Each structure stands twice: as structure tokens, then as C-alpha cells.
């Protein structure tokens, strides 16, 4: 935490404060005469300006050039320094879009600087080579600027003269604050004090002057001669210089990032302030200027996974009104839901689906009207989304361990429950402003206490889950719960439909309803950093045949893990969480090559914890390594899962029947290549019946106890020999409800009075293998539930469930219980704040 804190402080004092002036400063008038448009409408009068650049009006012979060396240059530099230090006064809220990510990236690098630099090569030849590259590379960039100035004098080319002068001015402007920061922060270089990188030690590592000078020169050249080739060459050379300072172990990565940012920003300020448009060159808008009137790339909150919106959209998708939805990657943002609804609008407005489809569309349109119309695009708005309370009574002992036995209630955000009276009361709210988005859902949870599991059950857990732990779990009663729990709670930014968020977030990787095998909402949402392509992207060229594509990456930290086999031996203790907790990261990519067919591939990896530090080296190994090692090995790449999912709408019956499924393989790369050792979950969705159009049906089957006797041990799925807590977060299984070694089936039948009001009858059966647990186990439940909206702002949800389970290791004979719940939800659509974004 200390390194992260220093990262934020130094990045704000360094790259953000000193560099922000040039980016936050309003548009300064360009020197010289205003450019005139060409008479032929081409936007260029002499061909010097690049595409999109202002037209060039040559200076008359007797006019004094805007830029020259001598006292004029010294005066400009002095004015530059004054303006740059006054720059933060011009900050606007929109500048937080780039300030916060830059500060966050700097903080992240500070946290990993030591380990990253320590793992680089120590070869004397490599260090010398890298140092030569940075020195000679910077000399080459200075030579390019000076050469253009000299060549411009010989050829009487004012454009080349200006380029040379502004490149030198930008370099000097960047070096002044960089040198001041070096001596102010006094950071040690990597080779001092074993890569500790301590500040205020009379060091000169932070920030990198080579990076600052290189990027300031490169940015000026790239805009004086706009075009892809010039930009690629200039910025590639600047990048090579920057990277070589790291590999030469003269600077840490954070030193180079901050130095590069300062150099680029200084180059922008100098160019915008002193560039003479009469000699050629391109325009350079600030970020704030580019956002004026730009309604794209707006932040949008995710729709909660338990929202009524998903069943309604699922029906439109199954009936053929929406063709580009990626159903295997949820949740969706509000803007994505609005886009999907807009896709259905033409057919609905033409009256193709009748009153039922029209009613569904109209209710969704009311929910997402602002997103569809763009009435508040870019402005600040905040909304209290919901207030709700739920009470649940359970007449007998329920099952609460889906990892080892089963769960009475699955896919319920890991909420606690026990025999007796249980309750929750919560609220959710969100806010957006331009690219920014924030969301919070918090609730008070109450559940009664319960006696501990009997010795036979605890011994079965020890044998199946913790075979190397020398004792069984202690007979500790389950404590009552009375606490406030954060569910989804995150902040984020959207960049060109890639939404980057940080906080607690839910995932649903699969097209089914019962719960995907890999990621579901059966757990308390994981604290994670996520990058999500929230709107489908059509790939270019020949890759376009893959159709719309979405992808997602996340890195999160688990909770509640107690045991780990580290390189130093078994670490852990019953009732005490590991410190630090293991991490989990995942990647998924989904395609929709036809309007009826969707498929996706995913991978998740658990790694980290005591003995496995979170470093760039370990992280990259966990992402890219294809090999494996024995449990507890020092170079263990992590516990990896891989899988795929698909959804297929029958072409001849595309408005009737959809098949879907997802497969999961443990420690391999494909459930197709390793079909004999893969778990599968599959189902079908009948969107309506021929006579009763308001009736639909889903049926799903799932197994982790391979029916063909695959080459895996009993209880293999969701378990690992290194990370012995298994595929769980805070005690709940992250994947499917079926658990480690079971087979099961589910069915749901809904009758829809309206798109919001319905009753549902559902059935579930689970069988756990006797080879996994002594005597095996079964669970069967039947439930009747419904949702009734008495007004657009008030809804009631009820559920009555009859359950019978039999796990001999828990108790002899069958256990029967009845549960009933009632939830009241208030949706205050008028409780909101709005304002313009300044």
C-alpha cells in the first residue's frame, strides 16, 4: 500500500501537475495570420499541410517569422515555464478522463517497479547495449531537430526551421521541470540499494530526462509533418529510447512513464502556443476540445444480473428481433441495452410481433429512453436506482455448501441464509458524467446461527478437499450474520466502447439461466480491475466473417481462501484467511458469425498468495505459460481453466427454439480436444408455445461427474492441489451450482401476463457421486415464484419452495424443508440529479 500511495502522490505532483498545464490550457490563438481556405475546397493551398490540417498561407518576404533563435527563443521559454506552472488553474472536469488513468498507471508501476527491474537481465553486455541505444537514440533525435533547422536555412524552408526550433524549445521546456523533480524527489536508481527505489535519498532516477526529451521532440515532429509514417518513426524512436532506459537499469518503469508523459505534454504546449500555421503542419486539439460535442464513448452503468431487463431482452432475441446481442457475456451496460432495443425498433414499429412484443418493447423503451434519445449525453446525472427489502423463512436445515454438497439457493450473490428467519434490505444507485461511470449496490444482511456440521461431514470434506491438511475442520458453530455487504460497487471510464472499471463486479459467462460452469453470480462480487468491450465490434478485412465480436479481461482478488501449498510448504489455518489472498484473472472473446449462431472462448487462472507474490513476472507467466508444474512448485503458473460456450437459434424455427451450452476443462486448453475430461452444461429455450403465446420453457442439464468415465479423479473440477480453497470466493463456488462431482437438471416454465408480471414454476434435481462422498447425495426442489408490478415504481416478488435432500454424511435419512420469501422493491425513477459537465 505504501508504494501505491507514493505512486499516486508522485504522479500527481509530477506528470499531472507539471504536464497538466499544457493539456488543460484552453486553445491559444495560433501565431501569424489566420489560414485561408483554398478556392478549390480542398482545404490546402500549397500541398504542405497534411490531411485535416489548416490551409497554408505563405508568409510575405518582409514579414518577421514567428519563431527564431536568440533572445526571442529565450523569451518564449521563459513564458512557457510561467504558463506551465500556472496551467493547473485551467483544469476542467473532463480532464479527469486522462488524469486519473495516468495517475493510476503510475501508481501501479510504483507497486511493481522493484520486482520488474530485478527480473531484467544483468548481463554487462546487455546493460551497455541498452545504455548505448538510449544515448545514441536521443542524440539522433536532437540531431534530427538540429538538422532540420540547418537544412531549412540552406533551402529557405520556414517549415523546417520552425520544426527545429520548436523541437529544441520543447526539449528544454521538458528538461527544466524534470531536473527540478529529480533533485526534489531524490529517488535512487535501480542498481542502488537492491532495486528498492526509495525516494528522498539524494538519487536522480525520477523522472527520466531521456524519455522526456525524446517524447517532446517526437511529438513536435509528428505534428509538424502529420501523417502515419512520420508518427510511427518519431514515436517508435522515442519508445525505443524510453524502454532502453529501463533495460539498462538506469530508470524504473514509473520513471520512464512520467518522463514520457511530461515530454509529450510539453511538446503539445509548445506546438500549440508557437506553431505558425502559415508554414504548414497539422492541428493539435486538447482532449477537452475533442470532447466538445462528442456523444460517443460515454460511460454507462451495467444492468444488474437479476434485473427484469434480461428476460425481456432474451425473449426479443429468441424471437428474432435482435441479431447482434452477445448473450454469453453479461452484464450489459444500459447503453448497450438501448442499442439492442434500437435494433428491434423497426420490426416492432411495423407491427410484426403483435401486442405482446409491442408491450415488451414499450416497457424497455421507457426504461432506456434517455440512453436511446441521448437527452443527457455527456452531462452529469445521478440516479437512485432501487430500494428493496426481502424476508425469507426456512422451515428446516438448508444446504449452504455448493462446493462439497449442494445449495438450497444458488445464484443469489452469495447471500447468507440458515434455518429460521432471514432478511436483506438494500439500495442501488449510479452516476455518469461523460466517460465516467460509478455504481453502488449495498445491503444489510441478516441470517441466524446454525450448529456445526457433524464429524462425518467434516471428515468427508477433509478427504475430498484438503487431503494434505493434517486434521479435519473444527466443530465450530456457524455464527449469525448481521452486517452490511457491498455487492456491485465500481467506478470506471469508457474509451471508444472499451469500458475500464475497478471495484466489486459480477460476471456471467454463459448463455444459460441455471448458471455457467465458469463464472456466475453465485458469489459475492469479486474485487477486480476489468476491461470490457461493451458494444460488439466488427473486425476488419477477412476477419469480418466472424461477425460482431466482444471481449473482456479482468484481474481480481479472491476472499476467504484458507489453505495454500506454497514453495515453503502448506500455509494456512482453519478459520483464518490467507494474507495475501490469491488472485484470479480471466479472458473471454465471443463472436456471432451469423444472426443465429454465437460462440465464445474463455480462460480463468487462479494464482498468487503466500509464496507466490503478485509481480509482473508471475502475472505474465500465468497468462502466457503453456506448461505446468507439480503442486507447490516455485514456478507454478497458476490454476487454469478453459472453456467455450455457444448459442444456436434454429433457422427454420428461429422464433421458437434456441439451443445453447458451455463446456469447461480443468488444467487443459480446450473442452473439445479433451472431451473425455470436460464438464458440460447445455439447454434449450422455447420462447413460446403454439397456442399459449405467453408461455415459455427452459430445460437444462449439467454434469461434473463425467457420465462416460473420463480420465479425471472424483471431485476434480473446481479443486486444486496448490490453491486448496478451490474455485471459490468467500466460501461460495464461483462456477455452476452443480458442484464438484454431480449431475443435475433444471426446468423453468413462465407465464407472462406482461413483460414484468409473471409466474414461474421451476424444478431442480442434483445427484452427487458416491465415489466422491460416502453414500453420495441427492437434492430435489420444486418452486413457485412470481413478480407483480403494481405501478412503474413498486414491485412485489414472492417465492415458495419445497426441497428434499439426502446426504448421509450430514445426517441419516431425508431432510425436508419449505422456504418462502417476499421482496418489496421501490424504483424511484424521479429521484435523480442532473447537471452540465464543466
Image (cartoon, rainbow, N blue to C red):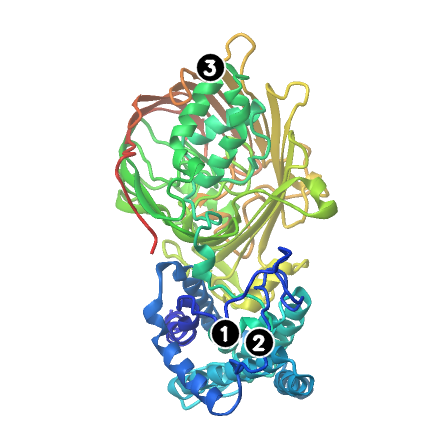
Quadrant location of the C terminus? Answer: bottom left
Element under label 3? helix
Left or right, residue 385 beside residue 355: left
Quadrant location of the N terminus? Answer: bottom left
| Camera-nearest label, 3 or 2 | 2
Closer to the chain start, of discs 1 and 3, is: 1
Name, please, the residue furthest toward the right. Answer: 542
* Residue 454 position in % (x across, y down): 38, 40
Residue 245 seen in this snapshot: no
The one of 368 and 836 positioned closer to us in this rendering: 836
The one of 741 and 315 positioned closer to us in this rendering: 315
Element under label 1? loop
Q: Which residue is mark 1?
A: 32
Is 582 situated above or below 127? above
* Residue 265 position in % (x across, y down): 48, 73
Is 224 situated above or below 213? above
Q: Residues within 10 Å of mark 2 (few under 14, many from 20)?
A: some
* Residue 266 position in % (x across, y down): 48, 76
Residue located 38% across and 70% down the image: 8
Residue located 60% across and 75% down the image: 221
Amino acid at each position: 500500500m505504501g508504494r501505491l500511495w507514493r505512486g499516486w502522490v508522485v504522479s500527481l505532483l509530477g506528470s499531472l501537475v507539471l504536464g497538466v498545464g499544457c493539456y488543460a490550457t484552453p486553445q491559444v490563438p495560433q501565431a501569424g495570420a489566420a489560414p485561408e481556405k483554398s478556392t478549390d475546397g480542398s482545404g490546402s493551398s500549397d500541398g504542405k499541410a497534411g490531411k485535416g490540417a489548416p490551409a497554408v498561407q505563405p508568409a510575405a518576404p518582409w514579414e518577421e517569422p514567428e519563431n527564431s533563435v536568440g533572445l526571442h527563443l529565450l523569451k518564449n521559454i521563459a513564458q512557457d515555464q510561467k504558463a506551465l506552472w500556472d496551467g493547473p488553474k485551467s483544469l476542467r472536469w473532463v480532464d479527469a478522463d486522462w488524469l486519473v488513468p495516468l495517475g493510476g498507471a503510475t501508481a501501479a508501476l510504483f507497486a511493481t517497479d522493484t520486482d520488474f527491474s530485478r527480473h531484467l537481465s544483468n548481463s554487462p553486455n546487455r546493460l551497455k547495449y541498452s545504455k548505448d541505444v538510449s544515448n545514441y537514440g536521443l542524440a539522433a533525435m536532437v540531431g534530427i531537430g538540429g538538422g532540420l533547422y540547418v537544412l531549412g536555412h540552406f533551402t529557405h524552408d520556414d517549415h523546417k526551421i520552425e520544426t527545429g526550433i520548436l523541437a529544441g524549445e520543447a526539449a528544454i521546456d521538458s528538461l527544466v521541470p524534470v531536473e527540478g523533480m529529480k533533485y526534489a524527489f531524490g529517488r535512487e536508481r535501480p542498481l542502488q540499494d537492491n532495486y528498492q527505489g526509495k525516494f528522498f535519498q539524494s538519487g536522480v532516477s525520477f523522472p527520466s530526462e531521456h524519455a522526456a526529451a525524446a517524447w517532446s521532440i517526437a511529438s513536435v515532429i509528428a505534428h509538424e509533418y502529420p501523417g502515419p509514417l512520420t508518427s510511427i518513426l518519431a514515436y517508435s524512436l522515442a519508445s525505443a529510447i524510453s524502454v532502453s532506459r529501463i533495460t539498462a537499469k538506469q530508470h524504473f518503469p514509473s520513471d520512464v512513464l512520467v518522463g514520457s508523459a511530461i515530454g509529450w505534454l510539453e511538446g503539445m504546449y509548445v506546438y500549440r502556443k508557437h506553431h505558425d500555421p502559415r508554414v504548414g503542419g497539422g492541428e493539435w486539439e486538447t482532449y477537452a476540445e475533442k470532447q466538445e460535442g462528442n456523444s460517443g464513448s460515454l460511460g454507462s452503468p451495467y444492468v444488474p444480473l437479476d434485473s427484469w431487463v434480461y428476460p425481456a431482452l432474451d425473449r426479443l432475441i429468441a424471437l428474432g428481433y435482435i441479431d447482434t446481442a452477445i448473450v454469453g457475456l453479461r452484464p450489459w451496460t444500459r447503453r448497450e441495452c438501448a442499442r439492442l432495443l434500437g435494433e428491434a425498433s423497426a420490426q416492432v414499429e411495423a407491427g410484426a410481433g403483435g401486442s405482446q412484443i409491442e408491450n415488451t418493447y414499450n416497457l424497455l423503451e421507457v426504461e432506456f429512453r434517455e440512453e436511446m434519445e441521448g437527452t443527457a449525453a455527456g452531462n452529469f446525472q445521478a440516479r437512485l436506482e432501487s430500494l428493496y427489502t426481502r424476508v425469507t423463512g426456512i422451515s428446516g436445515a438448508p444446504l449452504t455448501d455448493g462446493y462439497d454438497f449442494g445449495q438450497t439457493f444458488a445464484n443469489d450473490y452469495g447471500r447468507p441464509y440458515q434455518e429460521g428467519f432471514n432478511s436483506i434490505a438494500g439500495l442501488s444507485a449510479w452516476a455518469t458524467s461523460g466517460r465516467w461511470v460509478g455504481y453502488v449496490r449495498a445491503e444489510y444482511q441478516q441470517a441466524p446461527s446454525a450448529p456445526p456440521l457433524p464429524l462425518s461431514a467434516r471428515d468427508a470434506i477433509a478427504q475430498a478437499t484438503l487431503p494434505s491438511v493434517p486434521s479435519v475442520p473444527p466443530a465450530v458453530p456457524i455464527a449469525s450474520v448481521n452486517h452490511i455487504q457491498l455487492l456491485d460497487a465500481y467506478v470506471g471510464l469508457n474509451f471508444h466502447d472499451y469500458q475500464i472499471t475497478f471495484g466489486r463486479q459480477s460476471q456471467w459467462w454463459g448463455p444459460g439461466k441455471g448458471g455457467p460452469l465458469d463464472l456466475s453470480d453465485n458469489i459475492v462480487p469479486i474485487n477486480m480491475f476489468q476491461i470490457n468491450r461493451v458494444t460488439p465490434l466488427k473486425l476488419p478485412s477477412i476477419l469480418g466473417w466472424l461477425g460482431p465480436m466482444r471481449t473482456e479481461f479482468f484481474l481480481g482478488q479472491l476472499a476467504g481462501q484458507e489453505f495454500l501449498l506454497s514453495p515453503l510448504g502448506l500455509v494456512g489455518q482453519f478459520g483464518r484467511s490467507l494474507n495475501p489472498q490469491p488472485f484470479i484473472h480471466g479472458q473471454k472473446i465471443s463472436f456471432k458469425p451469423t444472426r443465429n449462431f454465437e460462440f465464445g472462448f474463455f480462460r480463468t487462472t487462479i494464482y498468487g498468495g503466500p509464496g507466490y507474490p503478485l509481480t509482473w513476472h508471475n502475472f505474465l507467466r500465468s497468462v502466457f505459460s503453456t506448461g505446468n508444474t507439480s503442486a507447490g512448485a516455485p514456478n507454478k503458473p497458476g490454476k487454469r481453466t478453459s472453456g467455450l460456450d455457444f448459442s444456436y437459434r434454429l433457422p427454420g424455427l428461429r422464433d421458437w427454439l434456441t439451443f445453447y451450452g458451455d463446456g469447461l476443462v480443468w488444467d487443459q486448453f480446450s473442452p473439445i480436444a479433451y472431451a473425455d475430461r470436460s464438464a458440460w452444461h447445455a439447454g434449450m429455450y422455447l420462447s413460446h408455445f403454439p397456442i399459449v403465446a405467453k408461455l415459455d420453457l427452459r430445460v437444462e442439464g449439467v454434469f461434473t461427474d463425467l457420465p462416460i468415465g473420463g480420465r479425471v479423479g472424483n471431485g476434480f473440477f473446481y479443486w486444486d492441489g496448490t490453491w486448496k480453497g478451490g474455485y471459490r470466493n468467500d466460501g461460495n463456488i464461483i462456477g455452476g451450482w452443480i458442484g464438484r462431482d454431480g449431475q443435475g437438471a433444471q426446468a423453468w416454465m413462465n407465464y407472462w401476463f406482461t413483460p414484468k408480471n409473471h409466474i414461474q414454476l421451476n424444478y431442480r434435481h442434483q445427484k452427487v457421486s458416491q465415489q466422491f462422498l460416502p453414500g453420495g447425495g441427492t437434492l430435489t426442489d420444486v418452486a413457485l415464484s412470481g413478480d407483480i408490478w403494481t405501478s412503474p415504481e413498486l414491485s412485489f416478488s414472492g417465492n415458495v419452495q419445497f426441497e428434499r435432500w439426502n446426504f448421509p454424511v450430514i445426517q441419516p435419512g431425508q431432510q425436508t424443508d419449505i422456504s418462502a420469501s417476499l421482496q418489496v422493491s421501490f424504483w424511484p425513477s424521479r429521484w435523480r440529479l442532473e447537471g452540465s459537465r464543466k
